[in-house]
Amino acid sequence: MSPEKKGQMPVEINQKWCKACGLCYALCPKKVLEGDEWGKAFVAHPEDCIKCQTCEIMCPDLAVKVVALRKATKEDE
Amino acid sequence: MADRLRLMQGNEACALAAAMAGVRFFAGYPITPSTEIAEQMSEMLPKLGGKFIQMEDEIASMAAIVGASLAGMKSMTATSGPGFSLKQENIGFATFTEVPCVVVNVQRTGPSTGLPTNTAQGDMMQAKYGSHGDIPAIALYPSTVPEIFDMTIKAINISEMLRQPVILLMDEIIAHMREKILVPTQEEVDKMLVSRPKPAKGIDKYLPYDASMSDVPPLAAYGEGYRFHVTGLYHDATGFPTSKPAEVDAKIRRIHRKVNNVVDDITFLRYDQMDDAEYAIVSCGSTARSARRAVVLAREKGIKVGSLQLKTIWPFPEAKVSEVCSKVKKVIVPEMNMGQMVHEVERVAKGRCKVVPYNRVDGEPLTPEEILETLAKEVAW
Amino acid sequence: MAEAWDFLRTDKMPHIWCPGCGHGVMMNALLRTMAKLDVNKDDICVVSGIGCASRLPGYLDFNTLHTTHGRALAFATGIKLANPRLKVIVVSGDGDATAIGGNHLIHAARRNMDITLICMNNNIYGMTNGQYSPMTPTSMLATTAPYGNLERNFDLCKLVEGCGANYVARATAAHPRNISQYIEYALTHKGFQFVEVMTQCPTYYGRRNKLGGPVEMINSLKQNTILNTAAAKLPPEKLEGKIQIGEFVKKEELTYLDRFDAMVDRITGGVKP
């Protein structure tokens, strides 16, 4: 993560839609995501995100978005 | 003129009328005595820019016409008793989701497979109560080939006007009978046609069940850019599910009200010699033909009898039948069933006149002589 | 670049499905395919029957229709024939498509009707709380099979292949990229396009059969799956209990509408009515 982006999360969780199924953090290869006390996902280790998008595409609730990926694409353009 | 004057079968007249009235989608399943309608449609529609498909079963053919109607095509199917039973769930769906379409039921002798293919009038009540839940039914029932042509167009028009299925009842006799008919020109038919209410152009947000302006909300077609949702669940003005008691109540009451409000416009009757009648015969379909003949025979004997033919069965023409019941001594209700419409007549007669059922249930036509005999007995009594 | 969420009726979210429902994974994959193809929303019509899976169209910003149990393909047939410009997609569950709607499935595929069917197979009737379906494997438990299911399930893809569909593929909720890939193929080709997606029902199938929660069920879907091309090289005994995924049929035979249009040309001499 570049210094200027510090504080910005690579993954956004829509807390209103998240149903705490746990698929995203169970399947995250880098354990970027973890479950909170209710089992809802939150970003615990943003610096480890490799933008593989597994969390996003495995989310049954469309509640996860790898925003870092979108920003990167924008910058590439 | 000469080529418009035709000897035509009832089913054929139904199909021709539908095609001339703009029906461009027909899905059906073979069943006697309605099959000629499907056969005619399969020949005509592809040449008219329409589509015919023989579906895998009765249920599917009902479903397909609802789908086609939602995509904007005037749609129709035809069947007989066993198939009519199978279609009921989707007839209910179309009524509840307010999708126009016409279902022809050429009645044959039931119950079950019954007598393929003799005549009957056993589906009068099924036409109203066949589907689950409270659905407002509209059913028309002609008695001659020219009437079949006319009532087919009326059924299509009412269905479009009210955004709901209309049942066109027939019976084996009139469906298979050939009679003289002067087929109207396309221009004449075009003048009669009614189209479904459409959303105003350029509206911001289309609500498929917004009844704030009318009990019949405008219906867009899929693909026109409105992307609306249709469901058989209770739904609000937006078309999405609701279980709020007030919205549930409003929906079911509105779909009944939209029919009840136009009862006079969709009530079609034929009176024969009713002006001075002391006795009345109330009947429909091919039985009405026998009733009219019985009137002639009875008048020759000096009996003052008239005939009221119900071309609209549902909603039951209460006011008009009640009027007749208030004027005559007795009403004969001949039917080719165990007694169905007679209960409706009794209900509106409210004891003001005697209501006499006459039922023929052997699969054979109900004859003028039988009606005359019944009448004569009642007159002597 | 369009995003999955652009095709979602976000005001209808969150959806009604249980936590960890495989149908949600499928919907996610479907939406991402829509975004990738950047479809015109007005040109898409999504039809469903009854059941958990059939609630899906309500969440999609297309022309959507939620019909009667098992009949979605028949309604869809009417829509497609009335307006062939519409891309018609049917989404169903296994009960909807293989039991009450089995006849319509056979004949839509036989006609090679220009419809895409996505069947979310979770081996159970979820909406009614877990009765066995034609897709429940033998001996598994369901509320109506308290002593274990006596009946046999069957290979749905083989059925649809036998009926003559142009495209037949299977993925699982553990393989969302395959789902997207197969749906993309289906949406860009003509004729009957069939994608079966094995999904997990943690609530009514997983719990009763002690298969664990969503994570365990996804892991077992992943472990029990083999790509059909790899399976072809293995002896049958090694494939016991394995779900084969992949593209089983890829044909471009004449579709119903191809035949219909040709017939109209023939009977009208090419003069469009």
Image (cartoon, rainbow, N blue to C red):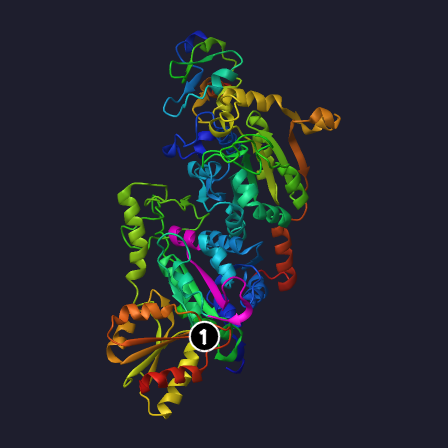
Considering the numbered disc 1 on the image, is that residue within a helix, a strand or a loop? loop
Q: Residues within 10 Å of mark 1 (few under 14, many from 20)?
A: some
Where residue B289 sits: x, y (%)? 43, 80
Query: Which residue sits at x=32%, y=45%?
Result: B237
Residue B111 lies within the magenta run: yes
In the picture shown, does residue C105 fall above or below B56?
A: above
User: In the current view of this chain or complex, which residue is farthest to the top?
Assistant: A3
Tell me if I can see residue B84 in this picture.
Answer: yes
Specify whether A15 is left or right of B250. right
The answer to which of B288 and B158 lies nearer the viewer is: B288
Q: Quadrant of the C terminus of chain B?
A: bottom left
Tell me if I can see residue B195 in this picture.
Answer: no
The answer to which of C95 and B351 lies nearer the viewer is: B351
The answer to which of B93 and B363 lies nearer the viewer is: B363
Specify whether A29 is left or right of B319. right
Q: Which residues are magenta?
A: B91-120
Where residue C243 sits: x, y (%)? 63, 28
Specify whether B379 is left or right of B57. left
Where residue B168 sits: x, y (%)? 44, 66
The image quarter in which residue C60 lies: top left
Residue type at the position of mark 1? Arg
Where residue C152 sits: x, y (%)? 62, 36
Residue C124 lies within the magenta run: no
> Residue tagged by mark 1?
B360
Query: Which residue sits at x=36%, y=24%?
Result: A16
Q: Residue under mark 1: which chain is it in?
A: B
In the picture shown, does residue B341 fall above or below C236?
A: below
How many labels sit on residues?
A: 1
The answer to which of B168 and A55 lies nearer the viewer is: B168
